[in-house]
Each structure stands twice: as C-alpha cells, then as structure tokens.
Amino acid sequence: MHSVALGSRFVIPLRNPLRKIQLPHSPSSPVKLFSLLSDLHSLTKMENFWTGGLVDKNKKMVESLERYGVIKSKEVAEVMERIDRGVFVQSGTPAYVDSPMQIGFNATISAPHMHATCLELLKQHLQPGMRALDVGSGTGYLTACFAIMVGPQGRAVGVEHIPELVSFSIENIKKSAASSLLEGSLSVHISDGRLGWAELAPYDAIHVGAAAAEIPDALVEQLKPGGRMVIPVGTIFQDLKVIDKKLDGSISTHIETSVRYVPLTSKDAQLRG
Ligand code: SAH
C-alpha cells in the first residue's frame, strides 16, 4: 500500500465533460461534415452530463480511483460501480468529488478514496456468505457495498448512534442497488457502535467509520477467528489500523496509513461538536 497520507483533502480531479461546441452553419464539405458529426457527438455527451449522467459520473469516479491505484481489484471496482455514491449524499452535494462531505450531526460521508481503501483491505473477508459489521454507518454507503459483496446468503449490519442518520441511510439504501437486500441480509440499527452488534456476531469483516481513541474490546471479541477489522485509531493524529484475528484467536495489527475521521464517541459529545 502507498505510504502517502490519504488525508481528507486528497482530491482526484475528474475530467470535465463540458467543452465548447460550435455548430458549423453548413456541412457542405467533408471536413465540415466530420466536424458536425464530432460536435454532435460532444452534444450527446453533454446531454448525458446533464441528464442520464449520474451513473456515468459514478463510473468516471471509479475509473479515476482505478487510475490512481486506489482501487486495485475487479470486486471493488464492480461494487463501487453498482452502488451509486450519488444517492448517499444530500441533494446539492458534489457526490463524486474525492473529498469527505458533510451529512449533518457533525458527521461526514468518507471520501471515495477512503471507501475504496477500506473495501480493498476487507475484500477477502467480504466473500459471498460472510458477515460484515459497519460501525458508524452514517450514510449507509459502505453497509450497502458490504451487503452486495456478501450477497443474500451473507449478512451486512450497520450500527449508527444518530437515529436521523439511520433513517437517512435506510432511505439511501432503498434508492440503491442494495435495496432488495434491506431487512433480509442487510439491516441498520440505532446503537452505540463501540458495543458492536453482538446479536449477529462473530463477523468476518468489521469496518469502523469513526476514529476510536482506543480499540473497543467488544469489537475485537466480535471478530471471527480468521476475520479482519479496519479501524481508524487516535484523536488528533490517527492511523488506519488493520487488525487480523488469527485462527488461534491471537491478534496481529498493522498500520495502513494516516487518516482523519470524525471521532467514535458518545452521541452527546458528537452533537456538542
Ligand atoms: N462510513 C460512513 C462514515 C460516517 S462518519 C459514511 O461514509 O457514510 C462517522 C459516523 O460514525 C457518523 O455517522 C457518526 O454519527 C457515527 N458515530 C460516531 N460515534 C459513534 C458511536 N459511538 N456509535 C455509532 N455511531 C457512531
């Protein structure tokens, strides 16, 4: 993995699909005809930008992340293409820019490169039939990705302590490619994520979307032997830690990169800011 700190302001510029279009008055010469066809092609592309372009923009975002080497695998590219980030942000928010965005309640949707990084780190533990826990599920974006990856025979659980964000995430998931899995293999719960979600433990994959001062014991306990947890740890300076529970129950930890997440804390502390 790259040693570059993927901080919150790492922005991948997406190609601007708007360019100047001048229609020639008469397509009398072959050169002019070619120019007209080429301009019409641009016009179609421009129309796509304004109308059917959302899915297209999501695809372009995924392609950028692949070009930059953040997405390395077909599985991650596929799930990020299927789950359109655009339906997980409030209207008016530039969904496809590689930056975290405010979602209210002093929370943010993580930047696309962080979602991609966490999916890459967890992909072996998100195989069909496996169980995944998303702590601090926020918008529900990663919970939906997990649900698609583990499939209807698996289980994806989101835990979020702000009730309004749980409702928001459920509405978002309903608009996404994971909608048919809701309340089947995918559920989102209002709870303190530091306690995990014991009812459906143990988990092959645990993702924590907020930075913990200390790694919560309950989460380590709820990790299956052979499972992996990805968790930002720290206060001002934070590391994205990868915790592997070996089959004998012992734990190995490595630091993947430096990050900046909102804190994993009490609801009151978060709302106070
Ligand atoms: N992965 C989410 C990240 C949202 S930001 C996304 O990209 O949409 C982190 C989230 O963690 C916030 O929604 C915040 O409300 C939640 N959070 C913080 N502390 C928590 C706790 N103790 N229990 C549950 N959720 C928590």
Image (cartoon, rainbow, N blue to C red):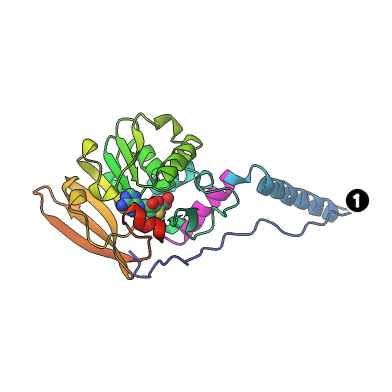
Which residue: 47% across, 66% down? 10
In what quadrant of the picture does the C terminus appear?
bottom left
Q: Would you say 204 lies left or right of 73 here?
A: left
257 or 19, which lies in front?
257
Magenta-colored span: 55-70
Name the spot of residue 177 as percent of width and height, x first: 47, 36
Can you give x and y, in whole percent of width and height, for residue 60 in the image?
A: 55, 52
Percent of width and height locating residue 103? 48, 52
Look at the picture and state if 121 lies above or below 238.
above
- Which residue is painted at 72% across and 59% down in the image? 19
Dominant SS in magenta: helix
Residue 59 counted in the magenta span: yes
Residue 169: name its quadrant: top left
Residue behind mark 1: 28
Quick one: 255 or 72, which is closer to the camera? 255
Q: Position of residue 38 (x, y in %)?
A: 75, 52
Looking at the picture, does residue 41 appear above or below residue 19?
A: above
Q: Please rate how many residues cluster around mark 1, counting C-alpha atoms within 10 Å: few if below 14, some from 14 to 19, many from 20.
A: few
Q: In this orientation, which residue lies closer to the viewer: 168 or 79?
A: 168
Identity, as a three-letter code, of the amino acid under mark 1: Ser
Q: Is residue 209 visible?
A: no
Locate the N terminus by quadrant. Answer: bottom left
Q: Is residue 179 above or below residue 86?
A: above
Whether residue 136 sits left or right of residue 164 in the image: it is: left
